[in-house]
Image (cartoon, helix red, strand yellow):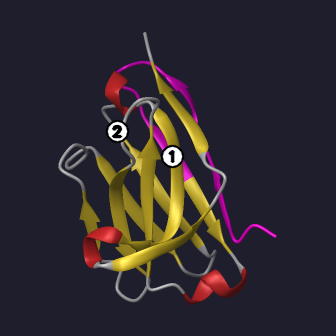
Amino acid sequence: QQELVESGGGSVQPGGSLILSCVVSGSTLRYDAIDWFRQAPGKEREEVSCIRRSDGSAHYGDSVKGRFTTSRDNAKNTVYLHLNSLKSEDTGVYYCGRGCSQWSIPVDSWGQGTQVTVSS
């Protein structure tokens, strides 16, 4: 059973917005941090954000800072990624994972991913 399930991806034009959701379940509910990372063909995996379960503090990668926002709703066991001012280079499969590389918390599980395509 998948303990991290992403949804909300789609196709948008440059400048558009999307909201991705990550529903957390099972043993993963005891997470310290959840990250969002993306993978595009021919590019390295890139961690775009992290959020702590305890206090909601967040970290963002330089390429998305000021455009993406992550939040969590502990009552709904859901972590969100708000994608604004989207660019073509934001295209990729977005995954939520348990952990955060930037905070030296190993990312040891992730969901199946959701595709984001930014194109005119």
Nearest to viewer (mark 2 / mark 1): 1
Q: Is residue 11 magenta?
A: yes
Tell me the SS state at disc 1.
strand
In percent of width and height, residue 1 lies at 82, 70
Splitting the image into 4 quarters, where does residue 119 fall? top left
Please give the name of the residue rendered at 42% of the width and 77% of the height, measured from the top-left corner.
106
Q: Which mark is residue 94?
A: 1
Residue pointed to by mark 2: 84
In percent of width and height, residue 73 lies at 53, 74
Q: Measured along the vertical axis of the image, is residue 49 above or below residue 57?
A: above
Q: Which mark is residue 108?
A: none
Amino acid carrying mark 1 in the image? Tyr
- Position of 84 with respect to 19 (left or right) is left
Amino acid carrying mark 2 in the image? Asn
Q: Is residue 95 visible?
A: yes
Q: Name the one closer to the observer, 41 or 25.
A: 41
Q: Name the one closer to the observer, 66 or 108.
A: 108
Q: Name the one closer to the observer, 6 or 97.
A: 97
Please give the name of the residue rendered at 61% of the width and 84% of the height, measured from the top-left corner.
29
Please give the name of the residue rendered at 51% of the width and 46% of the height, measured from the top-left corner.
94
Where are the magenta residues, as a range?
1-20
Q: In whole angstroms, how far apart are the C-alphas of marks 2 and 1?
A: 15 Å
Q: Is residue 34 magenta?
A: no
- Position of 120 with respect to 7 (left or right) is left
In percent of width and height, residue 60 lies at 25, 58
